[in-house]
Image: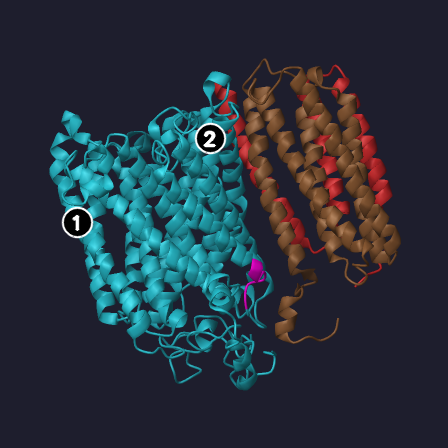
Chain colours: A red, B brown, C cyan
Amino acid sequence: MAKEHGKRPYIRVFVGLAVLTAIEVAVAGLALDDALRIFILLGLAAVKAALVALFYMHLRYDHRLLAVIGGFPFLLVVIMLIILMADRVIKS
Amino acid sequence: MTHTTAAEHHHTTPVWEGIKTVKFAIWLFLASEIMFFAGLIVAYISIRYSDPNWLLASELLSVPLVALNTFILIFSSVTMVLAFDSAEQGDLQKSRYLLLATAILGIVFLSIQGFEWSDLMHEGIQASTNLFGSTFYTLTGFHGAHVAIGVIWVLSVTAKAFRGGYAEDHLGIELAGLYWHFVDLVWIILFTIIYLI
Amino acid sequence: MSTATPTAATHKDYRYAPVSFWRRYVFSTDHKIIGVQFLFSSLLFFIVGGLIALLMRTQLAWPWQEIPVLGQYIYGSTGNILSPEGYPALVTMHGTIMIFFFIIPVLSGAFGNFLIPLMVGAQDMAFPRLNMLSYWFMVPAFLVMIFGFFVEGGTAAAGWTSYVPLSALPDMVPGSGMGQTMWIISLLLVGTASTMGAINYITTIVMLRAKGMHMFRLPMTIWALFITAILVLLATPVLTSALLLLLFDRTIGTTFFLPEGGGNPLMWQHLFWFYSHPAVYIMILPAMGMASDIISCFARKPLFGYKPMVFSIMAIAGLGFIVWGHHMFQSGMNPVLGITFMTSTMMIALPSAIKTFNWLGTLWQGQIHLTAPMLNALAFVSTFVIGGLSGVFAAATPVDIFLHDTYWIVGHIHYVLFGGSLFGVFGAIQYWFPKMFGRMMNETWGKVHFILTFVSFNLVFFPMFILGAYGMPRRIADPYNYTFLSNLQGTNQFMTISAYVLALSQVILFVNFFVSLYRGRKAADNPWQANTLEWTTTSPPPLENFHALPVVYRGPYEYSSPEVEEDWLPQNRELVPAPAD
């Protein structure tokens, strides 16, 4: 069953995740404009989540169908968020 | 893989285009879990957005401590993935200890979170105190429950590995790993939206 | 134990393997038994939900009257008369039971379980034990829901939608006490059970298809159940999270949905409808699929536009995720968002119209056999058109502002759910009964049942549109308190009497069902001369379905094919020379 798949960059991904976490904590402390700070933080979180999904959950190496199954819900989440936020923006 | 009759084949793990049914099903389960957390997170964001006087988590809780906890969970993810990798490479001994390390790191994460909860409760914030309390305990609580289930799962895998399991087939480690990484992924998002923003 | 070799002798060995009654019929992992378990339990709840509906109709025709003879058993504690707080409880339970304990389990649970492995050519579900677990999560859900009737304050009374704050504050009205908590717990169990089922169905359909069974050779029933399972998988967890938040509001004092704590009551509606609008398609898509199979079989013609049918199902399901706001036009919504929801909702009419067009195209110039299943499938198409068109009306924001929460909406949902789904279910029961139990249902009584049901159904539910246009609100026990509604009592009495006829007609179905179970004519393997794989095995099928795993050579709708003399050509029949793909 074991397939030889060469060296996978697990350690490098780990270092990346750790560094990104440190950057996140640093950015959170900066006196930036709220919207910009939130944008950067969400972006960093998305990169981290993508790293985990692609490398640790093997989506990069597995059948593409699994990535579709894992990715599709995020589309729904985005739709849900956009609609709810649009509703709140006008009312508040 | 040896040839099996259809009936036997059916009761082991059928494969379709290289995907094992159980792995496929775990991914479906994870998709439903994403939607579960989506419901909670969307509720949190919407509630928080409509409250201009929202209490920031960073004013109540120690962000460095949570950052350490995040690091621990990420570290447990790398031990988990290396456990699977070692098993794939045939180094079962290494795999066993890495699995054990993963479970221990999970327990450390839960302990730090438990400490954080009790700290917050001492500050007088319960789930019923205000919406910060409601959302904080609900989100971290459901995530913590997932970590706890993950710890139990990983421990059972560890036990089987120490008893000589997974010599041929590492699917069990992979499945537990997928769930474990998913829980880590959810934490990455929760850490950002609860503590940092 | 091999089924790979097509010898019937080895096969019998395990078919009659000596397992105890409990293992075979109660804690069974066989998808066929589990399907039948779902069928029987959901039919039981159909009776419960139907009787509750009769109580409501009785109240609306003759409000606050003592019910002769039976009153002391039903309303014994309130002087044999319905109490004012009892009516909302009836409304809530009718909706909850019919939706969560009848329509969804009978479509996905009963037919999904029974048909998926048979129609894709598999021996069982991908995870038989998970399948059993799914049913055994339904059983406590049933029990908790029934138990809710007997707790202090009675059962939940906040409507099947359980809008907050009525459902979030335990001391709001009698029914929002323990009964509401039971309702939440029961739905959490149902949700878990459906999610398990969905994972199993999707995996089975994707991975366990017989050799040669490409996705585009799947019968429409399987396509519909497949898309339905995806909807269940992705929508149900959102309901679960909303229910848990509601449970916390009720028990540990959080205020997610309660404005006095800063919470947002509209959030419940958003989360609930994010689940429940897809759930509407969970309740209709499988019936669409089954009706397609029945219509094609009894028109002896290939299904018109197979791929458009598949893509229409996908489009309906996909749009279903972005239309939930149309339930909330009256709840207060950003008008820009309202228009978005209105447009996306109206777009659903397109794929629905494609499906209707294709059903008619299938019938056109077909050799139509008006059997009982076919009659029900035709009723499905025609009432679905009325239900669907009334949906387009309600989708328009300005119209909906007027029609919201009136009987018009009640008429709409019943035309879709009773007229659509339920006629589909009636058709499917009579169509697959021979395969399930090895006997035929009585055709004549099937037709009598159909005619009585179809006529009385329209007499009950069509006037609802008129009542709604008059402005009669739903969920009120005594509309005649309002002078502008007091002249509607005659119409309501007419509808109630029709409802009694409708209920009595169902007795015919049940008698036919149970008598045929024991006394029906023995069914041949393929009594309808249909093409799909379930008809190529014995009736009822053996333990692992097929004597030899089938190999599929063509799509499921090759009726009246010029290649063979008969007017049907089973999917697994090899023609020599084998036709090009």
Which residues are drawn in magenta?
C124-129
**Of the residues shown, which amino acid type is indicated by label 2?**
Trp
**Image quarter of the C terminus of chain C:** bottom right
Q: Is residue C382 above or below residue C83?
A: below
Q: x%, y% of residue C270?
A: 47, 32
Quarter of the figure with residue B36: top right
Q: Which residue lies under the disc numbered 2?
A: C268
* Residue B197 seen in the current view: no
Q: Is residue C40 left or right of residue B17?
A: left
Q: Residues within 10 Å of mark 2 (few under 14, many from 20)?
A: many
Q: Residue at x 41, y 32 (%)?
A: C178
Q: Residue at x 58, y 45 (%)?
A: B32
Q: x%, y% of residue C72?
A: 20, 41
Q: Residue at x 58, y 27 (%)?
A: B44
Q: Mark 1 falls within which chain?
A: C
**Which label sits on residue C498?**
1
Q: Is residue C93 left or right of residue C452?
A: right
Principal secondary structure, stretch drawn in magenta: loop
Q: x%, y% of residue C354?
A: 39, 54
**Which label sits on residue C266?**
none
Task: Give yes or no for contact between labels 1 and 2 (Cβ–Cβ under 8 Å).
Answer: no
**Mark 2: secondary structure:** helix
Q: x%, y% of residue C7?
A: 56, 85
Q: Is residue A42 above or below residue B21?
A: above
Q: Is residue B120 above or below residue A5?
A: above
**Of the residues shown, which amino acid type is indicated by label 1?**
Ser
* Residue C436 seen in the current view: yes
**Mark 1: secondary structure:** helix
- Residue C227 among those drawn in magenta: no
